[in-house]
Image (cartoon, rainbow, N blue to C red):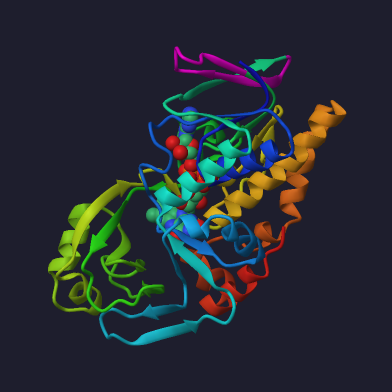
Amino acid sequence: MKCDIVVIGAGPAGLWAAKTAAEEGLEVVVLEEHAAVGLPKHCSGWLLGCEFTDKMFAGVKDALPHQKVTRMVIIDPLSGQVKEDVEDTGWGGYLVRRELFDRELAKLAVMAGAKLFLNVKAKELIKEDGRVVGVQTASDRLPEVRAKVTICADGMKSATNSGFAHREIASESESETYPGVKIELVNVREVTPGQIEIYECGDPALGSRSLWPHGWGITLASFSSIKAFSEVRSRRDNLLSRKLASSFPIYVGGFPNRKQMGYFYNHMVRDGVVFVGEACGCSGVIHGMITGSYATKVAKKVIEQGDMKIIDEYEKMLKNSDIYRNPFCYRNVRKNYGSYSVWLERSAEIRI
Ligand SMILES: Cc1cc2nc3c(=O)[nH]c(=O)nc-3n(C[C@H](O)[C@H](O)[C@H](O)COP(=O)(O)OP(=O)(O)OC[C@H]3O[C@@H](n4cnc5c(N)ncnc54)[C@H](O)[C@@H]3O)c2cc1C
């Protein structure tokens, strides 16, 4: 098969690139290795508030269960003391079910004219004269897709040796990984839908844990394993355990390949391939989607002018952008921004 743009991966970054490119009249093919868009789910589903989110979300929110984020509270679970209470002062954002959100984006991409292939895993980049000219897949149905521009959006896998970024652009120091599970819980006590709770203390079992109450009885949380979750739930010496005491998981998704949050790779273009979203080291749904829109802008110019060198403009565009200056990195917030309120205010200012 031949097309203008082939996108590897149907996550938010790849799908937004595909949607915007198809709207520009380009022929786009998206390859997704899983049998469903949005699964397995590994994400709390907090769409960070900014101008881009407002505009983009207007097009999907009627079709999607969502909860406006109203507050973020940072709590010491042992003393119960509130360390920081960040009320919404316009930073906003939404909690969404990521699997449903991704499917909405897939619908938009396909309705704009992109061709989406599920169960098709990109295996190798096809290189000719030192330049990538498409993708070889592991599928008999669609063994090869040739394209003028290849966009790599293979996401969370990117930092592992089975991901393309690891092979093409990542360095050792940039590909730190850590394991974990994302759990969808029912019946968490005393949480307020839309109010994100982050627990900070010296006890590693309790500190760095977060609750993301989506409403409809559902709260998301991350733990290093389901066993670690059960251990925290059985304790009685802290606020977090008491909140979890009567909860039960209804979904557990692994995120074995999560990179450290809060940075981008040094290079985001290699041999004509544009890396977007997690594949360029960039964390966060909204940040990833914005990288997808930058990739589209540059790819369109490359195709119209027939000049592959233009592709390098993507890296410049990204490095000069507000998302590059304000990475999605709530884990490193105090180190990088001093407080959560400062980070959120700066994030709200993100412009494309
Ligand atoms: C525990 C956890 C919680 C998080 N919470 C939040 C949050 O609340 N808010 C937020 O903004 N971000 C959050 N993130 C980060 C967010 O999930 C990512 O930044 C986002 O998913 C990146 O989007 P993406 O499109 O780059 O990649 P992904 O969403 O990872 O999508 C990549 C897609 O590519 C597919 N793929 C991979 N390899 C291939 C291949 N070879 N061939 C074909 N398809 C392939 C995958 O199956 C997948 O569908 C969280 C991450 C983790 C781990």
Q: Is residue 2 visible?
A: yes
Q: Is residue 159 visible?
A: no
Q: Position of residue 312 (x, y in %)?
A: 77, 37
The N terminus - image quarter: top right
Q: Which of 93 and 345 lies nearest the eye of the viewer?
A: 93
Q: Position of residue 271 (x, y in %)?
A: 70, 27
Is residue 138 on the magenta stretch? yes
Residue at 45% from the left image edge and 79% from the top image edge: 71
The C terminus - image quarter: bottom right
Quarter of the image where one finds residue 213: bottom left
85 left or right of 5? left
Quarter of the image where one finds residue 108: top right
Residue at 79% from the left image edge and 41% from the top image edge: 313
Identify the magenta region: 129-145
Up-down relation of residue 282 to residue 116 (above or below): below
Up-down relation of residue 319 to residue 143 (above or below): below
Residue at 22% from the left image edge and 63% from the top image edge: 186
Q: Position of residue 64 (x, y in %)?
A: 45, 57
Q: Which of 315 and 102 lies nearest the eye of the viewer?
A: 102
Residue at 40% from the left image edge and 32% from the top image edge: 34
Is residue 312 on the magenta stretch? no
Q: Position of residue 257 (x, y in %)?
A: 40, 43
